[in-house]
Image: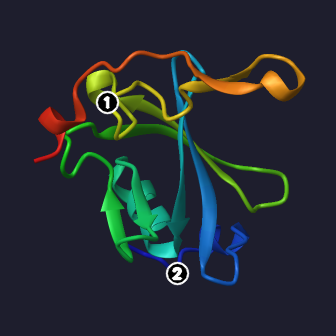
């Protein structure tokens, strides 16, 4: 991977060397997940066409689907106007992007009024996470 490619110089990485990355379904437009990318993961994603992120908890590259098989094939990479957010338009293989077994990580919606507000789960679990992660 060429992590010194000229196009990478347009990306504004934060003080930890990371840039926010949003994965969106290329067909439906549904936002699937949010993650972080570093220079190496972004370069590998562009080179391979497969989403690779930086796992802050594991402190290593995280190739989406490496454990679950739920790979993201990248159809487009986009950079926002300030150069500090990456958008990946992806085909989510297996239809599950979230570690909870749901299609999207954004499966809760704020519901109610005033002090009665609460997060309501709106999307079903498609596959038990215990069957996905061994």
Q: Nearer the viewer, residue 76 or 37?
A: 37
Is residue 61 depicted above or below 23 in this figure? below
Front residue of 118 and 12: 118
Q: Nearer the viewer, residue 119 or 70?
A: 119
Q: Residue at x 26, y 45 (%)?
A: 65
Q: From the viewer's side, name the closer residue of 132 and 114.
A: 114
In the rendered view, tell whether residue 110 sits above or below residue 12.
above
Query: Quick one: label 2, few (<14), some, or many (20+) residues within 10 Å?
Result: few
**Secondary structure category for the residue under label 2:** loop
Label annotation for residue 4: 2
Left or right: 11, with 96 as reference point:
right
Q: Choose top left, top right, bottom left or bottom right for residue 20.
A: bottom right
**Residue 92 coordinates in the image, percent (x, y):** 37, 30
> Could you say which quadrant of the image residue 22 lies in?
top right
Q: Residue at x 59, y 53 (%)?
A: 21
Numbered label attached to residue 12: none
Residue under the image location 38 percent in, 77 percent down: 59
What residue is disc 1 on?
101
Percent position (x, y) of residue 84? 74, 62
Q: Where is the N terminus found, in terms of image quarters?
A: bottom left
Q: Earlier in the sequence, mark 1 or mark 2?
A: 2
Q: Secondary structure at mark 1?
A: loop
Q: Is residue 89 left or right of residue 97?
A: right
Mark 1 neighbour class, 10 Å CA radius: few under 14, some 14 to 19, many 20 or more:
many
Q: Name which residue lies at 43% across and 60% down.
A: 53
Left or right placement of residue 121 versus residue 110 in this view: left
């Amino acid at each position: 991977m060429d992590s010194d490619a000229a196009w990478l110089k347009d990306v504004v990485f934060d003080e930890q060397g990371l840039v926010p990355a949003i994965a969106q379904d290329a067909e439906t437009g549904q936002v699937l997940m949010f993650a972080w990318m570093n220079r190496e993961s972004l370069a590998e994603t562009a080179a391979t066409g497969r989403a690779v992120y930086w796992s802050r908890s594991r402190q290593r590259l995280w190739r989406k689907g490496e454990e679950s098989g739920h790979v993201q094939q990248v159809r487009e990479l986009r950079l926002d106007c300030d150069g500090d957010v990456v958008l990946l338009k992806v085909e989510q293989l297996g239809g599950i992007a979230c570690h909870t077994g749901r299609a999207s990580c954004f499966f809760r919606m704020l519901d109610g009024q005033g002090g009665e507000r609460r997060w309501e789960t709106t999307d079903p679990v498609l596959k038990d996470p215990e069957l996905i992660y061994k």
